[in-house]
């Protein structure tokens, strides 16, 4: 897995995330399982991906479903452990610490510059 920075202007502030990119099958299958909770300003990008689960996790996360061009299709806020979420049109998923999507102003309809990360 590699680390990258993802930045975009958000409302009155500029939001920057340190993104861990999970592009291989083993990395996507593991995801955040067995890892400590993400800190504010951290995220994991799963690509390609359209469905996630929080089975076995001990903390909630925010989940952003993205189209191929970075278009935000859905934001699932504070997904509790032992849940599943998905979007049939999603091509990648951004997982963040619970509350980070709101802090960064991420909402359906906006575009995140994830193209270079995948």
Image (cartoon, grey):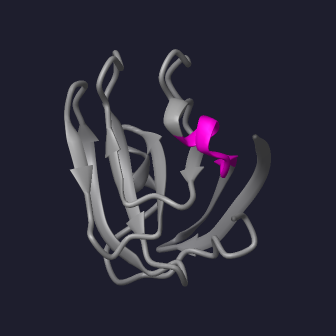
Q: Which residues are magenta?
A: 19-28
Q: Is residue 81 visible?
A: yes
- Up-down relation of residue 82 to residue 104 (above or below): above
- Up-down relation of residue 64 to residue 35 (above or below): below
Q: Is residue 1 left or right of residue 85?
A: right
* Foreground of the two, 2 or 113: 2
Q: Is residue 41 left or right of residue 75?
A: right
Residue 94 screen position, x and y as percent: 49, 54
Q: Is 62 included in the stretch rendered in magenta?
A: no
Q: Is residue 102 visible?
A: no
Q: Quadrant of residue 42?
A: top right
Q: Is residue 70 left or right of residue 19?
A: left
Instruction: Name the residue furthest front.
Output: 25
- Up-down relation of residue 93 to residue 21 (above or below): below
Q: Is residue 95 left or right of residue 59?
A: right
**Where's the N terminus, which quadrant?**
top right
Task: Kindly identify the residue that appears in the image at 23 percent across and 49 percent down.
Answer: 85
* Foreground of the two, 90 or 4: 90
* Foreground of the two, 42 or 102: 42
Residue 71 screen position, x and y as percent: 45, 81
Task: Kindly identify the residue that appears in the image at 44 percent across and 78 percent down.
Answer: 67
Task: Kindly identify the residue that appears in the image at 27 percent across and 65 percent down.
Answer: 87
**Where's the C terminus, which quadrant?**
bottom right
Residue 68 screen position, x and y as percent: 52, 79
């Amino acid at each position: 897995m590699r680390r990258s920075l993802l930045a975009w202007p958000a409302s009155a502030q500029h939001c920057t995330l340190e993104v861990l990119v999970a592009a291989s099958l083993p990395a996507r299958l593991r995801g955040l399982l067995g890892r400590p909770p993400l800190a504010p300003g951290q995220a994991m990008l799963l690509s390609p991906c359209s469905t996630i689960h929080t089975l076995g996790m001990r903390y909630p996360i925010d989940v952003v479903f993205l189209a191929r061009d970075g278009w935000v299709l859905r934001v699932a806020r504070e997904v509790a452990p032992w849940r599943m979420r998905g979007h049939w049109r999603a091509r990648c998923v951004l997982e963040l610490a619970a509350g980070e999507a709101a802090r960064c102003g991420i909402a359906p309809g906006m575009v995140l510059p994830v193209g270079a990360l995948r």
